[in-house]
Image (cartoon, rainbow, N blue to C red):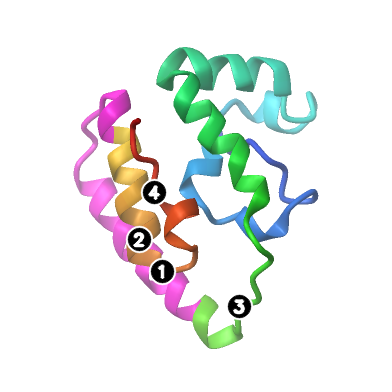
Amino acid sequence: MAGGHYTSVGSNRTICLNLHNIFIQSFHSNSWNGGDDKRYREGLKNTFGDDYLDFVESLKGHRPIQLRKDQLIDIKNKAQIIVNSLEKNKRVLTSSERITFRNNVNAELEIYDEEFCEFIKI
Protein backbone atom coordinates (compact mmCIF):
# COMPACT_ATOMS: atom_id res chain seq x y z
CA MET A 1 0.00 0.00 0.00
CA ALA A 2 1.01 3.61 -0.52
CA GLY A 3 -0.11 7.11 0.42
CA GLY A 4 -1.76 8.38 -2.75
CA HIS A 5 -2.46 12.05 -3.32
CA TYR A 6 -5.87 12.94 -4.78
CA THR A 7 -4.40 16.09 -6.33
CA SER A 8 -0.97 15.07 -7.54
CA VAL A 9 2.07 16.56 -5.88
CA GLY A 10 3.38 17.56 -9.31
CA SER A 11 0.29 19.58 -10.14
CA ASN A 12 0.05 21.30 -6.74
CA ARG A 13 3.04 21.04 -4.40
CA THR A 14 1.32 23.32 -1.87
CA ILE A 15 -1.22 20.73 -0.68
CA CYS A 16 1.06 17.71 -0.68
CA LEU A 17 1.06 17.56 3.16
CA ASN A 18 -2.67 18.20 3.65
CA LEU A 19 -4.10 14.99 5.10
CA HIS A 20 -7.38 15.53 3.26
CA ASN A 21 -5.40 15.07 0.05
CA ILE A 22 -3.71 11.79 1.07
CA PHE A 23 -5.41 8.39 1.24
CA ILE A 24 -4.30 4.79 1.23
CA GLN A 25 -3.95 3.41 -2.26
CA SER A 26 -2.37 0.31 -3.70
CA PHE A 27 1.19 0.79 -4.85
CA HIS A 28 0.14 -0.43 -8.31
CA SER A 29 -2.61 2.20 -8.62
CA ASN A 30 -0.40 4.93 -7.20
CA SER A 31 2.50 4.26 -9.53
CA TRP A 32 1.89 2.24 -12.70
CA ASN A 33 -1.75 3.32 -13.06
CA GLY A 34 -0.85 6.99 -12.66
CA GLY A 35 -3.02 7.45 -9.56
CA ASP A 36 -6.07 5.62 -10.99
CA ASP A 37 -8.01 8.90 -10.81
CA LYS A 38 -11.46 7.60 -11.71
CA ARG A 39 -11.46 4.83 -9.07
CA TYR A 40 -9.82 7.16 -6.52
CA ARG A 41 -12.65 9.70 -6.99
CA GLU A 42 -15.34 7.01 -6.79
CA GLY A 43 -13.76 5.61 -3.62
CA LEU A 44 -13.77 9.00 -1.90
CA LYS A 45 -17.37 9.63 -2.92
CA ASN A 46 -18.56 6.20 -1.77
CA THR A 47 -16.65 6.31 1.51
CA PHE A 48 -17.11 9.92 2.58
CA GLY A 49 -19.91 11.39 0.42
CA ASP A 50 -20.33 14.18 -2.11
CA ASP A 51 -19.71 17.08 0.31
CA TYR A 52 -16.34 15.70 1.36
CA LEU A 53 -15.36 14.97 -2.25
CA ASP A 54 -16.19 18.59 -3.15
CA PHE A 55 -14.04 19.77 -0.22
CA VAL A 56 -11.08 17.60 -1.30
CA GLU A 57 -11.38 18.92 -4.85
CA SER A 58 -11.44 22.50 -3.50
CA LEU A 59 -8.00 22.06 -1.93
CA LYS A 60 -6.47 22.86 -5.32
CA GLY A 61 -7.45 26.48 -4.64
CA HIS A 62 -5.13 26.93 -1.67
CA ARG A 63 -2.75 29.83 -2.12
CA PRO A 64 0.88 28.78 -2.66
CA ILE A 65 2.86 28.48 0.54
CA GLN A 66 6.59 28.61 1.11
CA LEU A 67 7.97 26.70 4.07
CA ARG A 68 11.41 27.39 5.49
CA LYS A 69 13.76 24.58 6.44
CA ASP A 70 13.15 25.12 10.18
CA GLN A 71 9.38 24.93 9.61
CA LEU A 72 9.75 21.67 7.68
CA ILE A 73 11.86 20.20 10.48
CA ASP A 74 9.21 21.20 13.03
CA ILE A 75 6.44 19.69 10.88
CA LYS A 76 8.42 16.46 10.46
CA ASN A 77 8.95 16.18 14.23
CA LYS A 78 5.25 16.76 14.95
CA ALA A 79 4.28 14.24 12.27
CA GLN A 80 6.63 11.61 13.73
CA ILE A 81 4.96 11.95 17.14
CA ILE A 82 1.57 11.41 15.47
CA VAL A 83 2.85 8.38 13.54
CA ASN A 84 4.27 6.87 16.75
CA SER A 85 0.92 7.25 18.52
CA LEU A 86 -0.90 5.67 15.58
CA GLU A 87 1.42 2.68 15.63
CA LYS A 88 0.43 2.06 19.26
CA ASN A 89 -3.28 2.15 18.44
CA LYS A 90 -4.11 0.13 15.33
CA ARG A 91 -7.89 0.55 15.67
CA VAL A 92 -9.73 1.01 12.37
CA LEU A 93 -11.56 4.34 12.33
CA THR A 94 -15.00 5.00 10.88
CA SER A 95 -15.31 7.41 7.96
CA SER A 96 -16.43 10.19 10.29
CA GLU A 97 -13.56 9.50 12.71
CA ARG A 98 -11.10 9.54 9.82
CA ILE A 99 -12.26 13.02 8.76
CA THR A 100 -12.05 14.29 12.34
CA PHE A 101 -8.57 12.80 12.70
CA ARG A 102 -7.42 14.50 9.49
CA ASN A 103 -8.88 17.82 10.68
CA ASN A 104 -7.03 17.50 14.00
CA VAL A 105 -3.69 16.55 12.48
CA ASN A 106 -3.86 19.33 9.89
CA ALA A 107 -4.55 21.82 12.70
CA GLU A 108 -1.71 20.39 14.79
CA LEU A 109 0.79 20.66 11.94
CA GLU A 110 -0.17 24.32 11.42
CA ILE A 111 0.58 24.41 7.69
CA TYR A 112 -2.71 25.41 6.08
CA ASP A 113 -5.31 28.15 6.31
CA GLU A 114 -8.28 26.97 8.40
CA GLU A 115 -10.64 26.74 5.42
CA PHE A 116 -8.27 24.23 3.75
CA CYS A 117 -7.35 22.49 6.98
CA GLU A 118 -10.73 21.41 8.30
CA PHE A 119 -13.75 19.79 6.68
CA ILE A 120 -17.00 20.70 8.39
CA LYS A 121 -20.09 18.74 7.38
CA ILE A 122 -22.73 21.11 6.06
- Tag 3 or tag 2, which sits nearer the N-term? 3
Cβ atoms under marks 3 and 1 closer than 8 Å: no
Q: Could you classify mark 4 by the number of other residues whose Cα lies within 10 Å: few (under 14), some (14-19), or many (20 or more)?
A: many
* Quadrant assignment, res 62: bottom right
Q: Residue furthest front?
A: 122
Mark 4 residue element = loop
In the depicted view, which residue is nearer to us: 106 or 64?
Answer: 64
Relative image position of residue 39 (x, y in whole percent) = 65, 15
- Residue 118 numbered tag: 4
In the depicted view, which residue is nearer to us: 97 or 49?
Answer: 49
- Residue 3 numbered tag: none
Which residue lies under the disc numbered 1? 110
- Say if residue 83 shows up in the picture: no
Cβ atoms under marks 4 and 1 closer than 8 Å: no
Q: Is residue 105 left or right of residue 97?
A: right
Q: CA distance from mark 3 to mark 1?
A: 11 Å
Cβ atoms under marks 1 and 2 closer than 8 Å: yes
Q: Amino acid at mark 3?
A: Leu
| Quadrant where the C terminus is found in the figure | top left
Which residue lies under the disc numbered 3? 67
Mark 3 residue element = loop
- Tag 3 or tag 4, which sits nearer the N-term? 3
Q: Does 39 lie within the magenta span?
A: no
Relative image position of residue 119 (x, y in whole percent) = 39, 41
- Tag 1 or tag 4, which sits nearer the N-term? 1
Q: Residue at x 75, y 33 (%)?
A: 31
Q: Residue at x 29, y 57 (%)?
A: 84
Which residue lies under the disc numbered 2? 107
- Tag 1 or tag 3, which sits nearer the N-term? 3
